[in-house]
Image: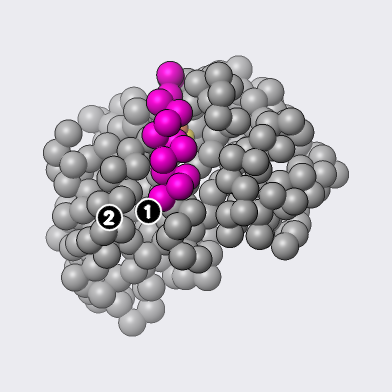
């Protein structure tokens, strides 16, 4: 797959890169089909979405460079695009930091961005324990060795990364969080994310009820025993270090 087309652009965000004012570009398509995915349009009907001209994005970044810190490249799954490095390079040329959101299925793409110095922060989803549960959570058969490889690469990326797990009822509970913690043992950061049922790809998950705060706190304690910092990105904002 070659050049990525930008299918969504958020000019300014305070919540997509912790501590930064960022712009966000959305790349279409994904090699996963997570039943709880909130971006169904972007991965299934992406051809019907208007393409955002890269020069328009670059123009915005240039004219707001005094207060935009960087660009978050998200999707979909950005690493499926062969020209991802060129896109990231364009943002770097404009003096922008680059954050990449990835599902970790293409470690070679992540390694290449790091090698070229084209990424400043990495965020990788850990969908489930690295066993048959991963396939269920991703909605496809996942090459788990690729996920392990990405975890290893990203864990070695200094301080500027996070692993993150969405707390999807029925897919991720107490045992799963313990096993996920073990899979990223010693990592700098593991973020537990609030599950949002409304637009889930699979209708069954639209009726699921997010975990109560007390259970989230319990999961944070479990996860926090495996990593340096663990916090919840969602309503209650509980943090453990
Ligand atoms: S990895 Fe899953 S949640 Fe992320 S875009 Fe792909 S299908 Fe959606």
Q: Which part of the image, by quadrant, shows the N terminus?
A: top left
Residue segment shown in magenta: 140-153
Q: Position of residue 212 (x, y in %)?
A: 80, 39
User: Can you identify the residue that label 2 sits on?
Assistant: 113
Q: Nearer the viewer, residue 121 or 178?
A: 178
User: Can you identify the residue that label 1 sits on?
Assistant: 100
Answer above or below: position of 148 versus 206: below
Ligand 1: which quarter?
top left
Point 55% across, 34% down: residue: 127
Q: Which part of the image, by quadrant, shows the C terminus?
A: bottom right
Question: In which quadrant of the rendered view does residue 186 lie?
Answer: bottom right
Point 65% across, 41% down: residue: 182
Q: Nearer the viewer, residue 225 or 90?
A: 225
**In this view, the mark in front (1 or 2):** 2
Marks 1/2: CA–CA distance: 9 Å
Q: Does 145 appear in magenta? A: yes
Q: Where is residue 142 in the image (x, y as percent from the top left)?
A: 43, 24
What kind of secondary structure does the magenta stretch mostly adopt? helix
Point 64% across, 25% down: residue: 171
Element assignment for label 1: strand
Q: Does 62 appear in magenta? A: no
Pointer 1: residues within 10 angstroms few (<14), some, or many (20+)?
Answer: many
């Amino acid at each position: 797959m070659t050049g990525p087309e930008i299918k969504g652009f958020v000019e300014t965000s305070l919540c997509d890169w912790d501590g930064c004012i960022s712009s966000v570009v959305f790349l279409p398509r994904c090699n996963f089909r997570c039943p709880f995915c909130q971006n169904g349009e972007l991965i299934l009907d992406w051809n019907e979405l208007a393409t955002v001209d890269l020069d328009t994005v670059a123009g915005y970044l240039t004219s707001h460079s005094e207060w935009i810190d960087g660009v978050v490249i998200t999707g979909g799954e950005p690493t499926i695009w062969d020209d991802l490095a060129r896109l990231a390079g364009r943002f770097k040329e404009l003096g922008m930091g680059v954050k990449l959101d990835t599902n970790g299925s293409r470690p070679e793409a992540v390694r290449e961005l790091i090698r070229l110095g084209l990424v400043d922060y990495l965020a990788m989803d850990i969908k489930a324990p690295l066993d048959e549960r991963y396939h269920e959570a991703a909605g496809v058969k996942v090459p788990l060795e690729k996920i392990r490889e990405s975890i290893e690469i990203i864990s070695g990326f200094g301080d500027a990364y996070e692993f993150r797990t969405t707390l999807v009822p029925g897919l991720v509970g107490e045992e799963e969080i313990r096993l996920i913690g073990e899979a990223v043992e010693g990592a700098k950061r593991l973020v537990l994310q609030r599950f949002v049922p409304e637009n889930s790809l699979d209708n069954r998950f639209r009726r699921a009820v997010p975990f109560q705060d007390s259970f989230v706190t319990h999961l944070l304690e479990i996860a926090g025993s495996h990593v340096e910092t663990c916090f919840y990105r969602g309503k209650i904002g509980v943090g453990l270090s």
